[in-house]
Amino acid sequence: MKILITGICGFTGSTLARAFQEFDSGIELWGADNLIRPGSERNRERLKSAGMHVFHADVRCHSDLDVAPAVDWVIDAAANPSVLAGVKGVVSSRQLLEHNLVGTINLLEYCKRTAAGLVLLSTSRVYSIAPLINLSVGVQNEAYRPQLDSYKVVGLSSEGVAENFPTKPPISLYGATKLASELLVLEYAEAFGLPAWINRCGVLAGAGQFGTPDQGIFTFWINSYLRQQPLKYIGFDGHGHQVRDCLHPSDLAALIWKQMKSPDRQVERVQNVGGGVASAMSLAQLTSWCANRFGKHTVGRDSASRPYDIPWMVLDSAMAERQWDWQPTVRVTQILEEIAQHAEAHPEWLGISGCI
């Protein structure tokens, strides 16, 4: 099998590549990356040393894909991952659209031309913000917990947000680019007979992830805490009770591997892929974990709200479990410890990540 991973020099892309190589040493791995993220060059050298074919390409430019070989599968892991992209920061709204939507269109045209299958890595942020903002929550053990007795929304349970949860706007410009990409992937698959899978991922986390808030809040927080860098809880009264679940990309790799091996399986093409309630954690809880691991560090507070912030997002991945006999195997405590050990071994990591 021949696989092309876009964004291969990022944390998720590089972790998937190494996992696939472990699953089958005989596969041929190709990777494309525009190398604009700080730290990407380090991953490129490691991937090339492992025998992978890595070339410079920007998915926003369709001609860059002209040099890509014909493959059996494309894993679309190239994207701007920030929910604030296009609204705040250095990325404009047009750049966001070009990265996350035009890039997927160019890959779909490539797949159409070469008859390759496509696995799109999507996001939990395709789900509607309004019902999540209005969610009644209480505080338990320094974390928000949904109060569902008097709040009924389709697709929401104590296990998290399921695939039938509303996707009505607003969902953020970032979420809109990913949802539009999902629709196009499904339409291309139907129109041109292409195998396709869409995985809506929660927060991915693990050692080697670039330590910036938008690329990985768990990695950013642990590295910053260890280095005694300024940290603060933003929004929701500045208490850090907002909750996310996390998933190690090696577990995502195991699911994608099953999907590529069964392109014609008659199941739903779109599924959530997250760590679920077992891996859910608030920033305040993460701070407590860091305090136990590294010692005391003061975290500031900023009660000002930001666009698209939500108090609680946990993905219900029951569909993926039913359809693929899949479930996460790396526990949240293992993920945090893995990040911590990497942070201790790489005191320069925040600088490499472009965070300081």
Image (spheres, grey):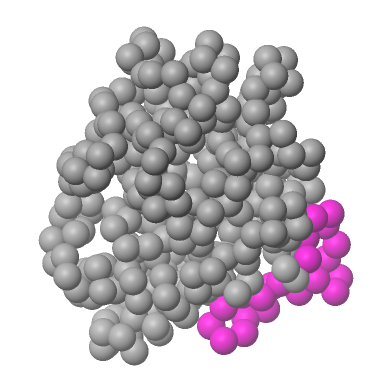
Query: In the visual, does 90 lie left or right of 72?
Result: left
Residue 153 location, x and y as percent? 83, 57
Q: Residue at x 44, y 31 (%)?
A: 2
What is the tally of numbered marks visible in this picture?
A: 0
Is 103 situated above or below 298? above
Does residue 198 show up?
Answer: no
Question: Image quadrant for the C terminus?
Answer: bottom left
Query: In the visual, does 254 lie left or right of 321?
Result: left
Residue lying furthest front in this view?
Answer: 26
**Magenta run includes residue 197:** no
Query: In the visual, does 159 lie left or right of 125?
Result: right
Q: Residue at x 75, y 71 (%)?
A: 158
Q: Residue at x 48, y 73 (%)?
A: 332
Q: Residue at x 37, y 11 (%)?
A: 66
Does residue 271 show up?
Answer: yes
Residue 355 location, x and y as percent? 23, 53
Residue 164 location, x and y as percent? 79, 48
- In this view of the protein, which residue sits in the foreground, 309 or 318? 318
The magenta stretch is 136-157
**Magenta run includes residue 153:** yes
Residue lying furthest left in this view?
Answer: 348
- In this view of the protein, which residue sits in the foreground, 213 or 208? 208
Name the image quarter holding residue 117.
top right
Is 308 situated above or below 26? below
Residue 350 location, x and y as percent? 20, 58
- In this view of the protein, which residue sits in the foreground, 47 or 245? 47
Is 220 situated above or below 24? below
